[in-house]
Amino acid sequence: MSLLLIVLVPFLGALLPGLMGRAGRQTCAMTTLLVTLTSLVGLISQAPAVMSGEVVTQSIVWMPELGLNLSLMLDGLGMFFAALILGIGVLIIIYGRFYLSRDDNMGEFFTYLLLFQGAMVGIVLSNNVLVLLVFWELTSLSSFLLIGYWKHLPDGRQGARMALTVTGMGGLAMIGGMLLLGRIVGSYDLTAILENREAIQASPLYLPALILILLGCFTKSAQFPFHFWLPHAMAAPTPVSAYLHSATMVKAGIFLLARLWPVLSGTEAWFFLVAGAGLVTMVIGAVVALFKDDLKALLAFSTISHLGLIVFLLGTGSSYAAVAAVFHILNHATFKAALFMTAGIVDHEAHTRDIKRLGGLRKLMPITFSIAVVAGLSMAGIPLFNGFLSKEMMLEEAAHTTIFGPDWLVPALATAGALFSAAYSFRLIGHTFLGKVRDDYPAKPHDPGIGMWGPPAVLCALVLFIGVLPQYAEPLVFFVAESVMGEAGAIPEGLHLKLWHGVTPALIMSIIAVGGGLILLLLYRPAEWTWKVLPVPFAKSIFDGIIAGVVALARGVIHPLHDGSFTRFAGLFFVAVLALAGHAWLTGSVAPPTREGLPMGEVAVAGWLMLVVSALALIWYHRNRLFALILMGIIGLIVSIGFAVFSAPDLAMTQLSVEVATIILLLLALNFLPNTSPSESTVLKRVGDGVVAILGGLMAFGLSYHLLLRDFVAPTISDYHLENSYKGGGGTNVVNVILVDFRGFDTFGEIIVLGIAALVIYALTQALMNGPVRAKLLNRRPDKDLAGDMHPLMMVVLTRVLMPMVLLVGVYIFLRGHNMPGGGFIAGLVVAIGVVMQYMASGFYWAQERQRYPYHGIIGAGVLIAGLTGIGAWFTGYPFLTSSFTYIHIPPLEEFEIASAMAFDLGVFLAVVGAVLLSLESFARMARRADQRESEYPMDIDPSREETT
């Protein structure tokens, strides 16, 4: 399986759980499991090549001018993290199937989980830092959905917002750092960046790039002082907590530190910033964890502490520490995921995670107790469990590291972190499972089925296997560590993973930590009392205060400037623009004219006078809504004629079609408004607005006049379009070729926006019709008597006769658009107007009964066809939306051109038709009244019918 498929399978598979939700919980979970297993099998299929030393790569050209290519890479580090993400993901899916209650939407949960999984796999397999950044932000968004999955819980919503805010801000900083890194190297590909260690560290941009990248890594991996978001993410369901805090989101920052280790490590800045932050985080997280009563909160702070341990090891910059960091990443993933799932089992069965309400569960939940003991002792760093081995390596590295002062400081802090780690591990086991059985549990605890204890049991088996036989994990750890170090380091000679290294400083420090942890647990009550009376600052309170201050500052600045009055805001903006333009005009110089003005004929003068009179009349009569709409139509018509006069027939046809369609839609909208708008402005304000408008008009006129009489300073892009329209796009109508080829991406975005606007109109009108306004709309009475013949015979006959002609004209305009004025947009408007006329002639009910295809679907089909046309260019090796064309000859017809742009234009056509008609249908549905009878006939008065409506 290709690397691209390994990344895409979770994203594509995310569509399935929602669809399978109605088929049952088992089917939904099994579908999700198969998606993850498919991606995992694809990864395993690449393992032999990677283990033999090959770096598997795949690249798809995307935006080469920006250095943005969909480039993927699989080496030892990427395979290690991808295996953790997908392997633990399999266990989490099984566990989640039995953890979630029947009230939880399992399809929604697994959809979010697969989106998150795909984003994480994308991060670890990216070979382009810009692509990595895209996946990085996707993890923030998808984790926001997962953390806030239980929307009914305020803590869940707050935790999701906090995580998104902190990691999102860090992501913005990291974007800057990655851009600087790419600028130093001259490439955004990781393979190129990793080969330029000397150039990067010698650059004056190294320190800014390092700080910005570390901000992204520290916020994502919850390093001090950005650690506070992680405990509040505990409001998520336990499967999410187990996944995020063992192998995925919080490991993303660790992964990036390891990925960039060969080029960023080895400097004083790296050492002090990374090792210092990791050491402080390790100690603070361990201390706070000891005094948490919520099982998941304790594990969350323990995660912060162990992440600090890994960051500290990566920060020291030695090869030995790199090996230790890789080893602890593996060990932490196994025991921490098992512990979170164990906490979830306790909460699921006892209905509480409060340690002070637990105790004595050893006899009631023996299987869960056994799993908790194995994983907990590994976290404490007890021999024969894998956590002991990597903790010893960390202590060994700390014993030989000096930072921020005397030689004993780092070993002392590392020992203190290990001591508190042992203490909170012992507390988790002892205060939850040991002691007497209580009779006041919220629910009667018991071991769950194998579906819940099976996944953590598998992880505990790995904990014991690695802890007892570390030599079997050594090849994998060394292979991944070599991938981390690259050419910047090598495995230390004589290093082996084993239980006994003799009596070393690390062993003595470990004995002190374990013994001190037991003593601290025995003295827990006085220690807890001391903790409570200490004036400890809480990071959440600080964060909330900062957010409140920023919001207050923003309100203080915004409210005086923008109080909700659009005219005031627009006036300030307009005056500022005029001031800048006036300054430029008065202080600058104007070159002499290089062109002569065109002669003004009588028709041009008459058109200009009509435009001026219409505009002035619109200003004078703007409160009369219907008359103002008529004047707007006249202005649009004159502008269309102006386009035609100045050799822009495409613009003229588009303007005219848009005018007709919008006038009809606005007439429908005016049906719900009074005939006149009230006067809300004072005379003084209107005079001020008039002065600003006149000045703006005069300055715009002066600028346009001088530009039209002078050549441009630089060559215009028009020459390129004129020269390449036929050669590159296969069309002689330059305007259409620009829309469907040169600027096809803009057009694609515009039809999406158009469709969204129509869907928003539909949603708003639906909300009105389903709410309390419905009765008022249905029972309204017109202020004037309506004609008895609302659907007249002549109108019906005329529109029926015109309909095939309109369709024929629309098809003609569509087909000729690539070489003559026309195209999908204009044709779509023409056809939409033809259908609108049927609604006008025979009414909403009659036309709706004959509608065969939903307008939502027509919009979707148009966007889909346009998008697939653009994707098709990839299969021929060209960028997205690059058109191709050829000429064919079918006897007896003459030779004619076939262009892929026609398919794109078809998508534009369908999107325009669907958007206009959906908007019309939405307004027309609101226009119905209770006193109106729905008629199945096309006209109210029909001589051939005995009964008329």
Image: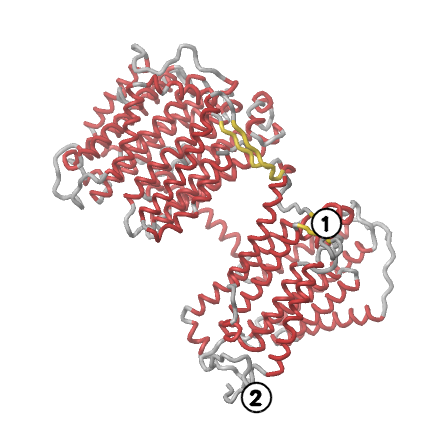
Of 729 and 339, nearer the camera is 729
Query: Measured from the top left, where is residue 751 in percent x and y?
Result: 59, 56
- Give the residue drawn at x 40%, y 34%: 85
Identify the residue shown where x is 55% and y is 71%: 669
Residue 5, percent from left and from top? 49, 37
Three-letter residue code for mark 1: Tyr
Residue that label 2 marks: 943
Q: Is residue 227 above or below residue 623?
A: above
Q: Position of residue 853 (x, y in %)?
A: 52, 64
Count neighbours of disc 2 (C-alpha within 10 A) and say few if under 14, some if 14 to 19, many if 20 or more.
Answer: few
**Along the line of sight, which residue is nearer the eye, 211 or 460?**
460
Relative horizontal placement of residue 893, taking residue 366 as reference (left or right): right
Secondary structure beneath label 2: loop
From this view, report whether residue 429 is shown above or below residue 654. above
Q: Amino acid at mark 2?
A: Pro
* Mark closest to the chain's N terminus, 2 or 1: 1
- Work out whether residue 886 can be spotted: yes
Which quadrant of the view contains residue 504? top left
Q: Which residue is mark 1?
A: 887
